[in-house]
């Protein structure tokens, strides 16, 4: 049986929070045949809204507390796990057999190996470490790293490639697969666009400042638009101050070592992103891991840390920092922030919140999980986020109290040594954030936030009704569809591309060995016709490959209508 995390008093709304009840049977039929002829636009939104001023465009709104939707992590039947282990066992067995053929010279080995004249040297390549890459990944490598040749908007173009040697090398054919529906990019609000009207200010900034600054901000690279963006980010989040950085990954990995060190304790969620893990390891602090979103596990570690102190000496920890994410990008789950804030206050710990996937994507006005739960942003000691997803740009930010930000400006390696953010990238973030806040004089930004929430609910509810096992929270635009078996992962990716749908598939070691999946990322730029086409093809592929493992059956009660909140439409690329 699966497990569901219930919530108290969820807001029941047939559009934003549909009530989904299990029934004895429920089969979904999507009346859509062949390729939909809807007008789709590769360059993002084509706005038809009248210019209207927003009445509230400055900091996050205050009001009654909001509640997150339910989360589901249904377990697959036992036979699925058995077949998954059997599949990995078979490919491993054949991998050893092929290694034997290579050793006796009957099969050519294309992977890097030691030269004969260096046989007495310390080995640079460990043979067994490459076993998985050599024998498993190479056979299915065509499902990843596919080259695209257009804007990665709601649809894109994919360059066709073939391999003459079972994916060891690829050759481009010169052909292009046009109008592939993009279900994998983190383009949550559709700001990855090339509309000339929207990008006019970005072009002007490029002409004014150029593409690069060629200096750190502490030296000659501090521009007025950098400080302008930092003030806007602080206002958007409702905090005292913020600091922007040119790389999202380094925002975590290079700032955490400046906050904690030897004698400090980091309590990290077991599913935290690699950038958080790397930053924690570089800091030299002691790291302890708690079970994902499990408050009993976290409190047990907190209680032990406070009561026992450091190992051997039992001295109190200098700092105890809890590190979590807003939305976990591989699970689609949302952090249980109110519970974590309560524990943080109870045990006098610090809280580091990574909102890379949640800022802009959740909350009534796109201000992340603090707004989703109706919490005061000051309850979070360190707010981190990136501009690479909802804002269609690059880089990241650290926000919080002014003392924190001023300290990091002097002690963070990424602030002191990295090049300043590119001017056109800075302007793109300013443009997108002002649009979300309504400071551009339109309601386009808020309309996109609402449309993303609508698309998320619509897509999730229909996937459940079809019988797929999906993970995550109802509010999360990241929707993992469980595929489990390694052969089905590859077959699914290839079958969807044949139907002109681009998907991201993920398997071991990026996921647990029995939980390979396809990860769908919804966007406000997706139209109902696009989503219906994807659902139609998913229904067919799910039947062909036997991917509908759910033992629950769902129906929508009441039926979830689809509202095109954004008054935008799409057309084929100009």
Image (tube, rainbow, N blue to C red):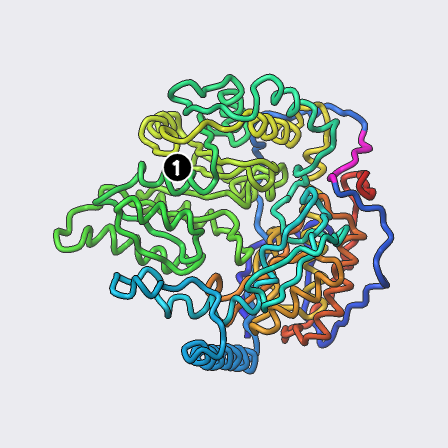
Q: Is the residue 368 above or below the residue 10 in the image?
A: above
Quadrant (top left/top right/bottom left/bottom right) for the N terminus: bottom right
1 or 124: which is nearer to us?
124
Q: Is residue 534 left or right of residue 62?
A: right
The image shows residue 89, relative to residue 468, as above or below, that is below
Q: Residue furthest left?
A: 313
Q: Is residue 568 visible?
A: yes
* Near-viewer residue (81 or 427): 427
Tell me if mark 1 has few (under 14), some (14-19) or many (20+) residues whose alpha carbon lies within 10 angstroms of its own: some
Residue matched to label 1: 381
Count of numbered labels shown in the rendering: 1
**Residue extent of the magenta highlight:** 43-49
Q: Residue at x 58, y 44 (%)?
A: 66
From the image, give the main secondary structure of the stretch colored magenta. Answer: loop
Is 361 a magenta residue? no
Say which quadrant the C terminus sits in.
top right
Dot 1: element = loop
Residue 252 placement (x, y as % from top left): 41, 41
Q: Is residue 551 above or below residue 279?
A: below
Q: Quadrant of residue 463?
A: bottom right
Residue displayed at 46% across by 24% down: 214
Taking the image as shown, residue 217 lies to the left or right of residue 357, namely left
**Residue 52 image offset from top left, x and y in percent:** 76, 25
Image position, residue 196 (x, y; %): 74, 29
Q: Position of residue 381 (x, y in %)?
A: 39, 37
**Can residue 480 be spotted in the picture?**
no
């Amino acid at each position: 049986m699966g497990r569901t995390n219930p919530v108290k008093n969820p807001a029941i709304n047939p559009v934003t929070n549909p009530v989904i009840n299990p029934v004895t049977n429920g089969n979904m039929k999507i009346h859509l045949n062949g390729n939909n002829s809807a007008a789709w636009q590769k360059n993002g939104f084509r706005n038809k809204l009248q210019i209207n001023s927003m009445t509230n465009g400055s900091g996050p709104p205050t009001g009654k507390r909001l509640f997150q939707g339910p989360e589901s992590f249904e377990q697959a039947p036992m036979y699925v796990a058995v077949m998954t282990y059997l599949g990995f066992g078979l490919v491993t067995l054949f991998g050893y057999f092929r290694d034997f053929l290579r050793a006796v010279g009957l099969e050519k080995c294309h992977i890097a190996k030691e030269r004969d004249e260096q046989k007495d040297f310390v080995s640079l390549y460990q043979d067994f470490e490459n076993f998985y890459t050599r024998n498993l990944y190479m056979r299915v490598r065509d499902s990843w790293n596919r080259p695209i040749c257009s804007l990665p908007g709601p649809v894109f173009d994919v360059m066709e490639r073939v391999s003459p040697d079972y994916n060891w090398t690829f050759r481009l054919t010169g052909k292009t697969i046009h109008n592939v529906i993009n279900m994998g990019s983190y383009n949550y609000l559709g700001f990855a666009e090339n509309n000339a009207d929207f990008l006019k200010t970005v072009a002007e900034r490029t002409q004014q400042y150029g593409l690069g600054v060629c200096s750190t901000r502490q030296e000659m690279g501090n521009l007025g638009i950098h400080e302008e963006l930092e003030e806007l980010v602080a206002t958007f989040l409702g905090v005292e101050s913020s600091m922007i950085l040119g790389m999202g990954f380094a925002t975590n990995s290079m700032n955490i070592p400046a906050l904690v060190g030897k004698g400090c304790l980091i309590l990290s969620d077991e599913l935290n992103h690699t950038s958080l893990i790397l930053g924690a390891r570089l800091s030299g602090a002691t790291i302890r891991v708690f079970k994902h979103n499990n408050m009993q596990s976290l409190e047990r570690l907190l209680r032990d840390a406070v009561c026992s102190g450091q190992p051997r000496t039992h001295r109190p920890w200098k700092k105890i920092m809890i590190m979590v994410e807003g939305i976990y990008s591989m699970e689609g789950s949302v952090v249980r922030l109110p519970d974590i804030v309560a524990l943080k206050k109870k045990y006098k710990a610090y809280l580091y919140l990574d909102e890379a996937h949640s800022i802009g994507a959740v909350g009534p006005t796109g201000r992340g999980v603090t707004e989703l739960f109706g919490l005061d942003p000051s309850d979070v000691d360190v707010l981190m986020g990136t501009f690479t997803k909802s804002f269609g740009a690059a880089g990241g930010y650290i926000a919080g109290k002014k003392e924190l930000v001023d300290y990091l400006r002097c002690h963070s390696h990424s602030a002191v040594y990295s090049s300043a953010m590119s001017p056109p990238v800075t302007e793109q973030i300013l443009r997108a954030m002002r649009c979300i806040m309504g400071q551009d004089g339109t309601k386009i930004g808020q309309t996109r936030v609402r449309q993303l929430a609508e698309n998320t609910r619509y897509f999730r509810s229909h996937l459940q009704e079809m019988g797929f096992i999906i993970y995550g929270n109802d509010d999360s635009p990241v929707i993992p569809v469980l595929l489990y078996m390694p052969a089905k992962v590859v077959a699914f990716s290839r079958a969807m591309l044949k139907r002109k749908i681009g998907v991201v598939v993920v398997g071991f070691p990026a996921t647990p060995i029995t939980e390979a999946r396809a990860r769908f990322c919804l966007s406000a730029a997706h139209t109902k016709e696009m989503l219906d086409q994807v659902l139609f093809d998913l229904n067919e592929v799910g039947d062909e490959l036997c991917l509908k493992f759910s033992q629950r059956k769902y129906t929508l009660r009441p039926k979830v209508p689809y509202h095109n909140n954004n008054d935008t439409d799409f057309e084929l690329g100009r």
